[in-house]
Amino acid sequence: MRLVRLSRSAERWFLAKIAALADVNPAAARHLIGRLEKLKALLSSFPRMSEKGILEGTRKVSMPPLVLTIRERDGIIEIAAIRDGRQKDALAPAELRDVDDEEGQDESDDDAAKPQS
């Protein structure tokens, strides 16, 4: 079994989420913490149990209502990021370039469709 830990940013995000949830429903906050601990135990035995992530070397793990991005680093399974399941996936750098290129094409297509004076 391998060590599973949260990155600093994932831990900060999760603690803020738990604090906000605990204000409304302390039992739900405890339940979410328990679910994360169970998932960490499962990941220690099966780190590749989920689908590949968008960025190379990452995997996406669903723990509704959260989505976790994990990666292996120096023999440790790291939960690199946590986000709300309603948020869109982060874009990989190559995809960001594609989006920029498409936006540029849209503008040039609009210019081509305008009548010239």
Image (cartoon, rainbow, N blue to C red):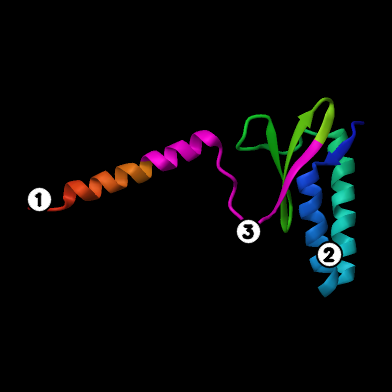
- Compared with 27, 62 (above or below) is above
Q: Inspect the image, locate mark 1, and give the three-letter code of the amino acid beneath it.
A: Gln
Mark 1 to mark 2 CA distance (whole Å): 59 Å
Q: Secondary structure at mark 1?
A: loop
Q: What residue appears at the point 86 percent right and 64 percent down from the top-left corner?
A: 29
Q: Inspect the image, locate mark 3, and give the three-letter code of the amino acid beneath it.
A: Arg
- Compared with 65, 82 (above or below) is above
Asked if labels 1 and 3 touch by Cβ distance under 8 angstroms, the answer is no
Q: Position of residue 115 (x, y in %)?
A: 11, 53
Mark 3 Cα shell of 10 Å, populated few (<14), some (14-19), many (≥20): few
Mark nearer the N terminus (3 vs 1): 3
Asked if labels 2 and 1 touch by Cβ distance under 8 angstroms, the answer is no
Residue under label 2, please give it: 19
Residue under label 3, please give it: 86
Residue under label 1, please give it: 116
Residue stretch in magenta:
78-101
The label nearer to you, 3 versus 1, is 1
Which residue sits furthest left?
Answer: 117
Asked whether, in this view, residue 51 is left or right of residue 99, the answer is right
